[in-house]
Image (tube, rainbow, N blue to C red):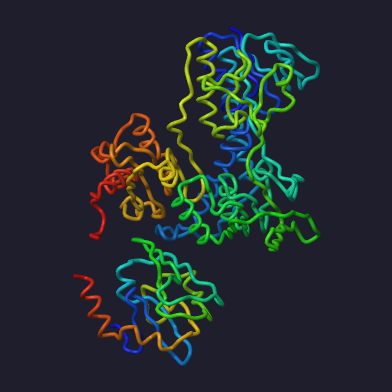
Amino acid sequence: MRLAVIGSGPGGYVAALKAAQMGAQVTVIEDSEVGGTCLNWGCIPTKTLIASTELLSRVRDLDKFGIDLSGSVLPNMAKIIERKNRVVDIQVKGIRALFKSWGIALKEGRASLSSPREVEVQLKSGGTETIQTDSVILATGSRPAIIPTCRFDGKNIISSNEAINLTEIPRSLVIVGAGVIGCEFACIFRELGTEVTMVEMADRAVSTEDHEVSELLEHEFKKKKIRLLTGAGVDRVEVMDDGVHTFLSDGKEFVAEKVLVSVGRAFNSEGIGLESAGVKKGSRGEITVNTKMETSVPGIYAIGDVTGGMLLAHVASSQGLVAVQNIMGAGEVMDYSVVPSAIFTSPEIASVGLRERQAEEKGLKIKTGHFQFRGLGKAHVMGEITGFIKIIAEEATDRVLGGHIVGPHASDLIHEIVVAMKNGLAVRDIAGAIHAHPTLSEGIREAAEDLHGQAIHTLRK
Amino acid sequence: MNPDDVRYHKEHTWVKVSGKKGTIGITDYAQDALGDIVYIDLPEPDTTVDANSEISEIESTKATSSVISPVSGKILKVNDELAESPEVINEDPYGKGWIAVIELENTSETDDLMDAAEYEKYVEEEAK
């Protein structure tokens, strides 16, 4: 079996490795950097920046922990970016080494389907190469979406791609879009001392999360003095002598050193020969696939962001594994019922399954259990008491339908609920398991107990 | 403990009236119940507030709670010192821990509030 994988992000590279491990002869074509958005401009770089700003925040609190610091603590942006680049480099090299060890051919250049079984590559080194293949996986990803009212200039009006490489801390920043990316950057730059204003069309920040999660995050933004305007549209953005002006539809105007636009992602489905191969696209430009990750053309599969579903690295990887299983003849379908996601704001956010309002819209009879981190000894020990754990269960069966965590290590804690959901466990199963003390995980058990009105560490009502 | 020159609201806030102005804050009982206060969401000056509605939010190591205004009116000024040092509310709830000064819409509103003796009795009842 010969397989050509176009794109080497978390979808493409995982698929390539799996296929090679199953005995396929694999060629990966990458026109930018190995590792894709996740490694080079997304997950890994932002989390590395956050590691620096979180440390900065902790050091500023040293006196609360009984540690005296003489001298000042200052972020050095050039060094922070340098560290980020080092971390990215290690990951990229790691993938290249894995490719080599599994005999995967890496072609650096721009790929285009010339037929369903033929990929033409414009090599970066010059010249073209035609690859004959039995199957193709399209894993070309996405890029920052452009809206006509705020066009990027790469310098003053920027996307997340540039924001991760700012070697000077902007004095002020307007962020258009208070979704995952916008909120993470708001926390990063606020900690660095930037005056941050966020403008969001929806009626709340991180509007795809549970409403209680948005409420808490907005409260924390207020504490950090991050200004958030919801239900606000941007009319236009203009670069002037005194800075970038953002004009809102309601007449308000803000001036800032830079404007970061984070209003979603556009799909990389152009110029890759979909037309020549006959691969169909949806209305948003996404490549349409079935549950086996196969496109409208047999033998051509598509995975990850470009398929327009859940734009998450771990979903892309899972889709890649499913696509490879099908290519290798095993027959597997993608299951999206239990997909966790994390937002690395401060405090951190993680969720899985149904949001409370979603459950209501579906007409489900549910029960919810809550636990505040401030009720936990370990949270006080760590000095991180903000946030809560919320579990949603079906009333009749007690089965876990969703979990929402805001607070310390939320992105790690969520997986207990993920495993419970994936295995159809009930809330009583979580409540019935002994959780070690003193840990943050105790909070999950408390939330489970609360759902049954049996939380121990709660005041009498 | 609870001063006699202020009026008390059942949501554990107080108002001290001087002419058309009322200074408000939370009671000693409230600060004690909340525990160490770590943050207060101060109201915006020049906005108006109705009696019995939320004027501010206080976060402590134990809980996040609404502060209910005992009176209606326009907010003239807020205690900015609390933004940096919210613990002042714990230390001096009737003094340096004041939250806002309100231009009273209707001075007779305070007639519905409790005096110190009534409030102490009310707290005792609530604790049962």
Quarter of the image holding residue A101?
A: top right
Please tell me which residue lies in front, A150 or A56. Answer: A150
Identity of the residue drawn at 43% across and 70% down: B54
Position of B121 with respect to A352 (left or right) is left
Residue A8 locus on image (x, y percent): 62, 24
Quarter of the image holding residue B99?
A: bottom left
> From what the image shows, is residue A304 above or below residue B128?
above
Position of A92 with respect to B7 (left or right) is right
Q: Residue furthest bottom?
A: B19
Quarter of the image holding residue A118?
A: top right
Please tell me which residue lies in front, A122 or A170. Answer: A122
Rendered-image quadrant of the C terminus of chain B: bottom left
Identity of the residue drawn at 58% across and 20% down: A97
Please tell me which residue lies in front, A37 or A367. Answer: A367
Please tell me which residue lies in front, B116 or A424. Answer: A424
Rendered-image quadrant of the N terminus of chain B: bottom left
